[in-house]
Structure formats: C-alpha cells, structure tokens
Amino acid sequence: MSHPLVIANWKMNIPSGGISSWIQSEMVSTNDEVDFNKKSSYFKFMGIAPPISHLSELENLLNFGFLGSQDISRFNDGAKTGDISADMVIDKGCTFSILGHSERREFYNETNKDVSEKLRICLEKNILPVICIGESLEDYNAGKTLEVLDMQIKEIFTSLSTKKTVVIAYEPVWAIGSGKTPTPDDVNNIHQHIKDIVQSIAEIEAISFIYGGSVNCENAKSFFQQTNIDGALIGGASLNGKEFLDIYNDFLETF
Ligand code: PGA
C-alpha cells in the first residue's frame, strides 16, 4: 500500500500575509465544497512542513492535514548545538519529516550517509520519512540522471528492511524554484526506474513516489495524471494558501 501525499514545504519562509491568513484561504476556498465534519478525510493526503519555530502555531490553528518537519537531527539527543531531534518534532505534532532535501545537501553538506541514518531514526520513531533525491543541472546535462539517482538510492537504502511506509521525493535540483520541470512522462519513467532499483536492494513494504520542482497550479495535474506519481512536494507555490489548495484539489480529482 502506498501513501499519496501533497506536501507544502515552506522552507525558511512564512506565507506572505501570515499563517492565519494562509489557513483562512484554505478554509474559504474549501468552504463550498467540503463538509467540515468530514474534513479529516478530505485533508488526509495533505502535509505541511513549516519552519520548526511555527509548528506550535500551526498545531493550534490547524485542524486538518499532517504536520511535518523539514529535517531532523541524525542524533537522538545530547550536545548537538542547533539540532532538533525526532522526539522533539514528534512532541510538536509532526508525523512526517522531509529528509535529504537538496538545499540541506548544498548548504549544509549533508551526505547520503546522513540521510540514511535519519531515515532509520524516522522508521524507529514512527515518523513517515520523505526522502529527497535528484540530480544537479550539471549531471542532467551530462545525461547522468539515472546514474546519480542509482548512487543516491544505494547509499541511502541498501539492506533496509521495513514494514513501514517510505515516501521518495524525486526532485531534480535544476527544477527547484526555477520554473523549469522535466516532462511528466520523464518523471513517470524515472519513478519507475527508482522503484525498480529500490526494490532490488531493499525490502520496503510500502513506497510512494512524489515529484518536486516548480510544481504549480498550471502544471500539477499533468504530473498527477501519471501512474507512477503519487503526489508532490511543493515549495514556492505552497506559500499561497489558495494556490496550494487548487493543486491539492487537482490531486484529489486525478487520484
Ligand atoms: P519549488 O520547491 O516548488 O519552489 O520548486 C520544491 C522543493 O524544494 O521541495
């Protein structure tokens, strides 16, 4: 069984207009169509990963969707200045965590080994891991996309055996925040490739494959229509509550 998911990754931003107006726009735009008594089922595929500092505010205001963190420490506790542990984000209501985002890799030198350790912590603590992989522009131009993905997958997943769900987010680095995307067809084929490689080196009972990189309300549907795309990880377009909800509705329609 897979776990379809559309995730808002706010990164180190707060939606312009603030969190309550972001939530308000979600409410207003859904008001006509959604029976709020059933909202938990309507929102069950929606994840929101705000900056850690705003988790409590969201937890108090938000009664829909899942909360997640954008990262966790690879350590459980102790003298690790600046880190936030898995237990700490669980305490703040998080049920999933993004791991190995390309910005963590680029600005904080995170390695596949770090991501692998964090993945195992998530599984141990019952946090749904959302693992980001993807090739750089240079690798893409050199035709090395699959080679790079294979290496990332091997270093992160080798010998993993779990009955828990894992989400893999394919995010080509060159597509993030650039307005450029691979074609939906290409993403579909790449997801199939990732699935094959992961299944050949690890035993994971349930894996979902989501796409991230310049998803917006214009192009979202074309990705969601693909058989191997189970959702999206959305940065820029998620900062606007109305746009994010439009994308989410497109997702539900094609699901
Ligand atoms: P973007 O970011 O939607 O702004 O391209 C996606 C991401 O970094 O997860």
Image: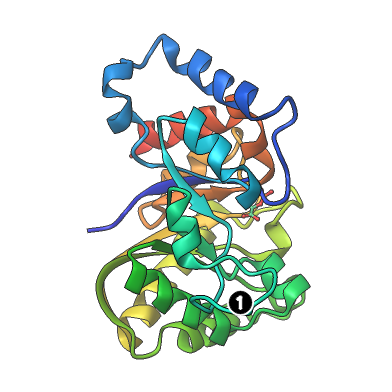
Locate residue 136, reporting x and y percent: 71, 73
Question: Residue 55: which quarter of the image?
Answer: top right
- Image quadrant for the N terminus? bottom left
Image position of 4 (left or right of 184): left
Locate residue 251, reporting x and y percent: 42, 37
Q: Residue furthest top?
A: 32
Q: Residues within 10 Å of mark 1 (few under 14, many from 20)?
A: some
Q: How many marks?
A: 1
User: Looking at the image, which residue is at 73% across and 63% down?
Assistant: 174
User: Looking at the image, which residue is at 61% across and 51% down?
Assistant: 52
User: Looking at the image, which residue is at 54% across and 36% down?
Assistant: 58
User: Looking at the image, which residue is at 56% across and 72% down?
Assistant: 73
Question: Residue 83: which quarter of the image?
Answer: bottom right
Determine whether the beta carbon of the residue marked 1 sits less than 8 angstroms from the nearest atom of ligand 1. Answer: no
Along the viewing direction, whichever of 92 and 7 lies nearer the viewer: 92
- Image quadrant for the C terminus? top left
Q: Residue furthest front?
A: 78
Q: Secondary structure at mark 1?
A: helix
Locate residue 178, reporting x and y percent: 76, 52
Image position of 96 (left or right of 124): right
Along the viewing direction, whichever of 114 and 153 lies nearer the viewer: 114
Colour scheme shown: rainbow
The amino acid on which the numbered mark 1 sits, given as a three-letter code, is: Thr
Locate residue 198, reporting x and y percent: 37, 79
Position of residue 5 relative to residue 252, above or below, is: below
Position of residue 57 relative to residue 214, above or below, is: above
Reading the image, the residue beneath label 1 is 145
